[in-house]
Image (tube, helix red, strand yellow):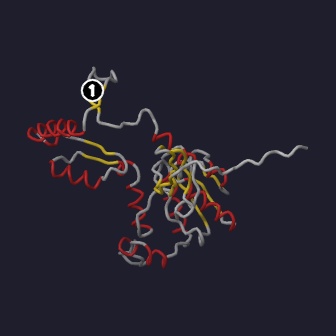
Amino acid sequence: MKAQPAIDTQPIVSDEIRKTTCYMCACRCGIDVHFKDGEIRYIEGNRDHPVNQGVLCAKGSAGIMQHNSPARLRAPLRRVGPRGSGQFEEISWDEALSTAAEWLADVREKDPKKLAFFTGRDQSQALTGWWAQQYGTPNFAAHGGFCSVNMAAAGIYTLGGAFWEFGCPDWELTKLFMMFGVAEDHDSNPIKMGIGQLKSRGVRVISVNPVQTGYSAVADDWVSITPGTDGLLIQSLIYELLRTNRIDLDYLIRYTNAPWRVIHAPGTESHG
């Protein structure tokens, strides 16, 4: 058989590499962005980044498509046609700021509470909230209030710190791992690597999700609950743990706010 010519499987595709983080989900994986002649050519995972250790999912790799999307706004736009016509023209940032200031000044003079606005993820919601208060309106919201602030608050009260979608499990010591509604598109790399560690140690993995996602498929048990009954399931688990006296009170005292919310004094009026 004639020998096939050698193929370079790792050709140089760039003349510059910039290290940054991926914004295609909340994981913030480290990435190396390859440039050629000033244009993005390729995105790969940063092997030295602690979050993803070089692993990059399909969304991260597709970041180049978002950057080059024809729908990406590159300048302020002003509508020049009827509402819904999709007719816009580009204007300068100075003109956009002047127009917005004029509109906002008129609303503030008449009734600042008539202004309501919503900001997306990674738009300095602490600063926009402060601005809204100075303006005089309570009608503002940000991405977190509709998405993950509740989860961060729960983390503070249960684990002592806020966390985002990928959480902060103890992968090395965990003996039982439960996932509630975990979505692959929001915490892909850290969870994948973590589950790999758990499976290699023989740890039992339970997925609670109405849909059999990829994580549910590799879990030891998939609990297909009815949407909206997560709280009922969790409360039932807590009830059974209490009923069978399987609560680790020492752990709760040391790591949670249980001592401030529960009085454990069986046989007394203050018990509960």
Residue 242 at x, y percent in the picture: 51, 69
Residue situated in front as seen by the camera: 242 or 197 = 197
Which residue is located at x 23 percent, y 45 percent? 139
- In the rendered image, which quarter contains the N terminus? top right
Crowding at dot 1, Cα within 10 Å, few <14 / some 14-19 / many 20+, comes out as few
Secondary structure state at the residue bearing disc 1: strand
Residue 119 found in image quarter = top left
Residue 188 at x, y percent in the picture: 56, 53
Residue 11 at x, y percent in the picture: 64, 49
Which residue is located at x 18 percent, y 46 percent? 137
Which residue is located at x 27 percent, y 20 percent? 82
* In this picture, residue 142 sits left or right of residue 59: left
Residue situated in front as seen by the camera: 255 or 231 = 255
Residue 269 found in image quarter = bottom left
160 up-or-down from 35: above or below? below
* In this picture, residue 57 sits left or right of residue 252: right
Residue 123 at x, y percent in the picture: 33, 50
Three-letter amino acid code of the residue under disc 1: Arg
Which residue is located at x 52 percent, y 63 percent? 49
Which residue position holds label 1? Answer: 79
- In the rendered image, which quarter contains the C terminus? bottom left
